[in-house]
Image: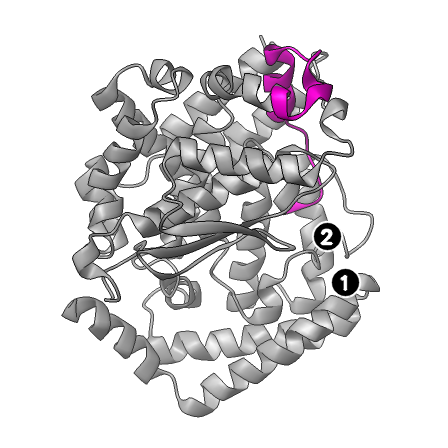
Amino acid sequence: MVRVVRRNMDIETKLPQALIEERAKLSAVGHEVWVKARKENDFKAFEPILAQTVDISQRIAEYLGYEDHPYDAVTDQFEQGASRKFWDGMFDSIRQPLTDLVAEIKASPNQPDDAFLTGNWDEGAQRAFSMKLLDGIGFRLDRGRLDTAPHPFCTNFAIGDVRLTTRFLDYLPSAVFGSLHEAGHGMYEQGSPDEWDRTPLAGGVSLGWHESQSRTWENIVGRSKAFWRHFYGDLQAAFPALASVDLDTFYRAVNRSQPTLIRVEADEVTYNLHIMVRYELEKGMLDGSIKVSEVPDAWNARYEEYLGITPPNDANGCLQDVHWSGGLLGYFPTYSMGNILSYQLWELLEADLGDTEALMEAGNFAPILEWLQVKVYRQGSKYPPQELLQRVCGGGLDAEPYLRRIRAKYSEIYELG
């Protein structure tokens, strides 16, 4: 506990009060400028805010200190122990395999149809089904609740008070998978030992580890065929319009992969490529190799290279995310770490538990949750993220399980050669 508090205090006390005030003011003003700039597709209006954000981040890096690259100090605030070299290695390992798989999927004649998932779905039925899923996988409703928000999130005030939000849209999977995603965050927060409640040791140890749990429950569990063998009958009962849609058609539809312009709409295959674009631009802005004025062109060029699509405007390009308006440089790569780590952990879980598909098909999620609680959740912030990785996985971050399983899954769905 002393170590965790000392680290937090060290970061806070190294940054001068005037710099903290400047960052806070810029974040408040920057958000409003970003909202207007995005609405009006006007990067020039947002450019001064982004330039100031980069300048403040560079100064923060100098105060915190780094040996190799200013990105090291900036990203360490969100993922302790991570660095430019760490993220470079992670993205280098997935760049070519993912761009190749995206191209193969795009060229496949066996494209799933998901049009039937969009419609006028009853909000009450969506809420009731979402609650059924949360209860089924093990989210403690006596220690949490589900509400709505424009963008889903999870927050908590104590181990026994964890709040989830979701949203109910015309696209039915939005509520389903948004709820599962936030439940992954929520169960991580609920899983700390009670005696650590309201101490710095309670809760997830880092953003990357947290995202690994939201992705585990949303994608590995929630988008599996075994999961829907158990829940699909309940879904059809809640939404009779799906009565004529067979399980295989539904499974392929909710796992559809295609390049999109918007990160938050991306699927398992393409999502990390969206993150890689943002990481490369952040790194370049911090070391000066990319000027802020060059961001729109650099963004579009990378989208064309990695995803084969070019944003028609900046609103659907470099202005789409809120993070930079709030000064959050160094945050994005943790999303990709979470995706990769979720599969790395799942392979270890399967080695211990055996046939996880049989467990999920039977609706028996307790052994899966218990394994994650013992290995991850109950550790809280006791160990630094990189040490926890060594303790649980026996080594560093490894993208091989993610790449192998993603290729196998999507080769089956798209009938790739």
Q: Position of residue 162 (x, y in %)?
A: 40, 55
Say which residue appears at 73% left-offset and 34% top-offset.
121
Say if residue 134 shows up in the picture: yes
Instruction: Name the residue type under label 1.
Output: Arg
Q: Residue 97, how many percent across, how many down?
A: 51, 28
- Local SS, label 2: loop
Work out whether residue 114 or residue 367 is closer to the camera in this orientation and state it: 367
Does 155 sit left or right of 254 as displayed? left
> Would you call the spot at circle 1 few (<14 residues within 10 Å), some (14-19), or many (20 or more)?
many
Viewed as shown, does residue 148 lie left or right of 194? right
Question: Tag 1's secondary structure?
Answer: helix
Residue in the picture at 59% in, 23% down: 235
Can you say whether 97 is above or below 80 in the image?
Answer: above
Is residue 203 on the magenta stretch?
A: no
Mark closer to the chain start, 1 or 2: 1
In the rendered image, which residue does mark 2 sit on?
317
Residues rendered magenta in the picture:
237-263
Residue placed under numbered mark 1 in the picture = 38
- Cα gap from disc 1 to disc 2, whole angstroms: 10 Å
Specify the quadrant that holds the N terminus.
bottom left
- Give me the residue at 57% from left, 51% from top: 152
Q: Is residue 239 above or below residue 413?
A: below
Does any portion of residue 90 appear in the rendered image? no
Number of numbered tags placed on the structure image: 2
